[in-house]
Image (tube, grey):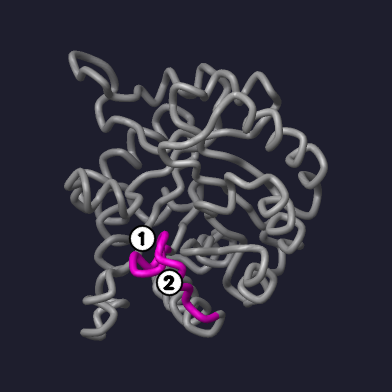
């Protein structure tokens, strides 16, 4: 991991409560610091409450549009003005359920950065794509959509989250060796564009990370923390996962 400070990020999806915010804020206060960065992605309606509780926050998605008549969308600049620092873009559930294309994700990435948010770009393959041996092809296409639009330098102000779709919410987890192999492929691909960007970029693993497997996953050379789903809703589990990420 070297100079890269690990991140443990909790994606609450469409879950959460004011009580959970209080409990996770207490955990975050205990485990945040020089060794690791801790952040959470609550539902947008809880964002102000979470920020007020002292949590390092982001939103689960933002609109690709700056402003306008887009009912129900989340404005990146407003998120930033509330005190949030991050947003997810391209989570597999956004891609599969809401039909976001690689181009849509690149547009959201651009809007997030132009508003002062750090995008966490989510990439990953389905079970069918892995079975067909297309893992590297899929993640390359997802990454290069952003590089084509914004250039490799844009990734210097971002985070990547590799989430094999087949391991999200299924209880299945890539082995540390499988995860490391794909993380290394991602870093090597970016290295071919810009060595400095590739070396400094934090690449998180997501996909049924829990307190039992996080230490081995985070020990891999190119895994710089995790994007945590269900376990981030359980304060003690989340705390244990955070403690296993050591810079």
For residue 11, side relative to residue 93 (left or right)? right
239 with respect to 158 (left or right): right
- Residue 183 image offset from top left, x and y in percent: 48, 73
Position of residue 68 in the picture relative to residue 184 (left or right)? left
Q: Are marks 1 and 2 in contact (CB under 8 Å)?
A: yes
Question: In the image, is 211 to the left or to the right of 190?
Answer: right
Q: Determine the residue positioned at 63% across, 53% down.
A: 7
Let me know if residue 150 is in the magenta part. Answer: no
Closer to us: mark 1 or mark 2? 1
Look at 25% across and 26% down and name the residue there. 65
Look at the picture and state if 82 lies above or below 221: above
Res 15 visible = yes
Q: Which residues are magenta?
A: 163-175
Q: How many marks?
A: 2
* Residue 172 included in the magenta stretch of the image: yes
| Residue 101: x %, y % from top left | 18, 50
Can you give x and y, in whole percent of width and height, for residue 239 in the image? Answer: 73, 51
Residue 163's quadrant in the figure?
bottom left
Residue 120 image position (x, y, % from top left): 46, 48
| Of callouts 1 and 2, the N-terminal one | 1
Q: Residue at x 79, y 47 (%)?
A: 31
Residue picked out by circle 2: 186
Q: Which residue is mark 1?
A: 123
Above/below status of 187 relative to 161: below
Secondary structure type for disc 1: strand
Say which of 174 and 196 sits in front: 174
CA gap, disc 1 to disc 2? 10 Å
């Amino acid at each position: 991991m070297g100079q890269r400070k690990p991140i443990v990020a909790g994606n609450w999806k469409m879950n959460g409560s004011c009580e959970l915010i209080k409990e996770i804020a207490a955990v975050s206060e205990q485990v945040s610091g020089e060794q690791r960065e801790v952040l959470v992605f609550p539902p947008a309606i809880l964002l102000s409450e979470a920020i007020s509780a002292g949590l390092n926050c982001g939103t689960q998605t933002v609109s690709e549009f700056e402003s306008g008549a887009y009912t129900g969308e989340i404005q990146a600049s407003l998120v930033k003005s509330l005190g949030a620092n991050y947003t997810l873009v391209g989570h597999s559930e956004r891609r599969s359920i809401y039909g976001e294309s690689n181009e849509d994700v690149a547009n959201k990435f651009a809007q997030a950065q132009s508003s002062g948010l750090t995008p966490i770009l989510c990439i990953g393959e389905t079970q069918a794509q892995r079975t067909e041996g297309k893992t590297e092809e899929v993640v390359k296409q997802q990454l290069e959509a952003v590089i084509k639009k914004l250039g490799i330098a844009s990734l210097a102000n971002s985070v990547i989250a590799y989430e094999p779709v087949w391991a999200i919410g299924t209880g299945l987890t890539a082995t540390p060796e499988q995860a490391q192999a794909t993380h290394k492929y991602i870093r090597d691909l970016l290295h071919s564009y810009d060595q400095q960007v590739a070396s400094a970029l934090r690449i998180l693993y997501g996909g049924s990370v829990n307190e039992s497997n996080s230490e081995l996953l985070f020990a891999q050379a190119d895994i710089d923390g995790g994007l945590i789903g269900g376990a981030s809703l359980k304060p003690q589990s989340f705390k244990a996962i955070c403690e296993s990420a050591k810079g």
